[in-house]
Image (tube, helix red, strand yellow):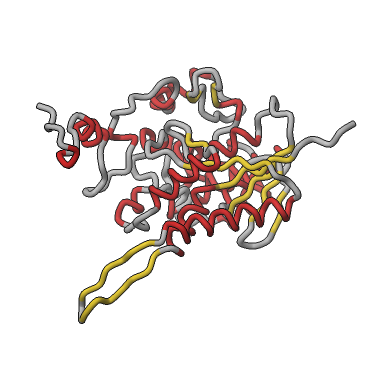
C-alpha cells in the first residue's frame, strides 16, 4: 500500500506578521524626525525560507497556507474578542504580504473565519485522502486531534480526540485574557486541569466552576465557544458557511436555544456589511468605507470621479 501524501497546514498569519516585522526599519533623517519603511523583498524571502525549512524538515512538498479573514464570526458572540488588538500598530506591509501569500501560495482565507479555524477544519476533515501536520506556535492547536508542530519550541504534539476535547474544557475554564475572554476569575490553566482531573473532564464540571464563581452556564458556554476551534463537522463545504457551533454532549438543540440563542446568529450566510464582524478601531476601514471607495475612480488616471 502506498504511503499517504503529507500536507503541512501552515499558520500563515504568524509567518506574515513575522516577515512584515523583520522587513521594517526605522530611520532618523534629522533630529527628532523618524520614518519607518519596509522591504517587501526581504519579507517575501523570510516567508519562503520558513516554508522551505518546514518542507525539508517534514519531507513533503505539499503545503496549505491559511490566513485570517478581516471579518470574524466570534465578534458576533463576544464583541470583546481580541478587541485589545485594535490599539496596536500593525506592520506597514502586513496586508500586502498576506495578499502575496494568497497569490503566490494559493493561500486560504475563508469568509468570517480565522486561520486557526481553517486549519482545524482541514485537519479534522475525514474526507481528505492525506496526512496533515499543523505548523504553528499557537497552543490552541492542542484542542485539535492530529499532529501539531510548535516550531517556536521545536515540539511535536499528537493529541487524540479525547485529549483535544479535554484541553478545550481546560481553556473553557481558564479563558485567554489576551484574546478577550476571561474564563472563571482566579482560575488559570494549572488549576483548571486539577479541577477537571478531580471532578471529571465533563461539561458539568465546567458549568459548576462558573456557578461557584457567581456566573452562569451561558457565561461558560460563551467562553467555550471562544476557546473552541471549528472542526469539519461544524462547517459546510457546500455553502462555505458554519453549520453549527460546538455543543456539550448532554445538550439538545432546545438547550442551546434556551441558554444562548445568539448561537444561530453565526450559522449560515452572514451579512458581510455587519460592522460587528470587524475589529472596532477608530482607524479601521469599515465595509461602508470600502464600498464608497469603489464608487470613485482615481483622478490620476484622467477619469472623472463618479457622481
Question: Which residue lies at the image location 42% right of the left edge and 47% below the top edge?
Answer: 181
In the image, is 268 to the left or to the right of 80? right
Q: Residue 270: name its quadrant.
A: top left
The residue sitting at the bottom extreme is 31
The answer, for residue 34, to whether it is visible in the render is yes
| Quadrant of image for the N terminus | top right
Residue closest to the eye, 119 or 245: 119
Residue closest to the eye, 233 or 227: 233
Q: Position of residue 171 (x, y in %)?
A: 55, 47
In the image, is 150 to the left or to the right of 39? right
| Quadrant of image for the C terminus | top left
Residue closest to the eye, 171 or 252: 171
The residue sitting at the left extreme is 307
Q: Position of residue 167 (x, y in %)?
A: 62, 46
The answer, for residue 200, to whether it is visible in the render is no
Vertical placement of residue 230 versus 41, above or below: above
Q: Position of residue 302 (x, y in %)?
A: 15, 36
Q: Position of residue 182 (x, y in %)?
A: 43, 50
In the image, is 169 to the left or to the right of 156? left
Question: Which residue lies at the image location 28% right of the left edge and 44% below the top edge?
Answer: 280
Question: Which residue lies at the image location 63% right of the left edge and 38% below the top edge?
Answer: 202
In the image, is 82 to the left or to the right of 281? right
The residue sitting at the front extreme is 302
Residue closest to the eye, 293 or 246: 293
Question: Which residue lies at the image location 69% right of the left edge and 40% below the top edge?
Answer: 7
Amino acid at each position: 500500500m502506498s504511503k499517504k501524501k503529507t500536507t503541512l497546514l501552515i499558520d500563515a498569519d504568524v509567518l506574515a506578521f513575522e516577515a512584515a516585522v523583520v522587513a521594517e526599519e526605522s530611520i532618523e533623517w534629522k533630529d527628532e524626525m523618524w520614518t519607518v519603511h519596509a522591504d517587501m523583498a526581504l519579507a517575501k524571502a523570510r516567508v519562503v525560507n520558513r516554508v522551505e525549512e518546514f518542507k525539508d524538515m517534514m519531507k513533503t512538498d505539499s503545503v496549505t497556507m491559511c490566513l485570517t479573514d478581516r471579518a470574524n464570526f466570534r465578534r458576533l458572540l463576544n464583541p470583546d474578542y481580541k478587541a485589545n488588538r485594535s490599539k496596536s500598530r500593525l506592520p506597514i506591509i502586513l496586508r500586502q504580504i498576506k495578499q502575496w501569500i494568497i497569490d503566490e501560495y494559493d493561500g486560504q482565507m475563508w469568509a468570517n473565519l480565522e486561520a486557526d479555524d481553517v486549519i482545524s477544519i482541514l485537519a479534522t476533515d475525514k474526507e481528505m485522502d492525506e496526512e496533515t501536520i499543523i505548523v504553528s506556535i499557537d497552543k490552541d492547536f492542542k484542542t485539535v486531534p492530529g499532529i501539531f508542530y510548535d516550531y517556536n519550541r521545536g515540539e511535536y504534539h499528537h493529541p487524540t480526540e479525547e485529549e483535544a476535547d479535554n484541553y478545550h474544557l481546560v481553556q473553557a475554564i481558564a479563558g485567554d485574557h489576551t484574546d478577550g475572554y476571561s474564563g472563571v476569575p482566579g482560575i488559570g490553566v494549572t488549576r483548571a486541569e486539577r479541577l477537571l482531573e478531580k471532578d471529571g473532564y465533563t461539561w458539568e464540571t465546567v458549568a459548576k466552576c462558573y456557578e461557584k464563581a457567581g456566573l452562569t452556564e451561558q457565561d461558560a458556554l460563551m467562553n467555550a465557544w471562544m476557546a473552541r476551534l471549528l472542526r469539519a463537522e461544524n462547517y459546510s463545504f457546500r455553502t462555505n458557511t458554519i453549520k453549527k457551533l460546538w455543543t456539550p454532549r448532554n445538550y439538545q438543540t432546545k438547550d442551546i436555544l434556551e441558554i444562548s440563542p445568539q448561537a444561530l446568529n453565526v450559522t449560515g450566510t452572514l451579512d458581510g456589511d455587519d460592522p460587528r464582524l470587524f475589529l472596532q478601531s477608530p482607524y479601521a476601514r469599515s465595509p461602508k468605507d470600502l464600498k464608497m471607495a469603489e464608487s470613485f475612480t482615481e483622478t490620476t488616471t484622467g477619469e472623472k470621479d463618479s457622481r
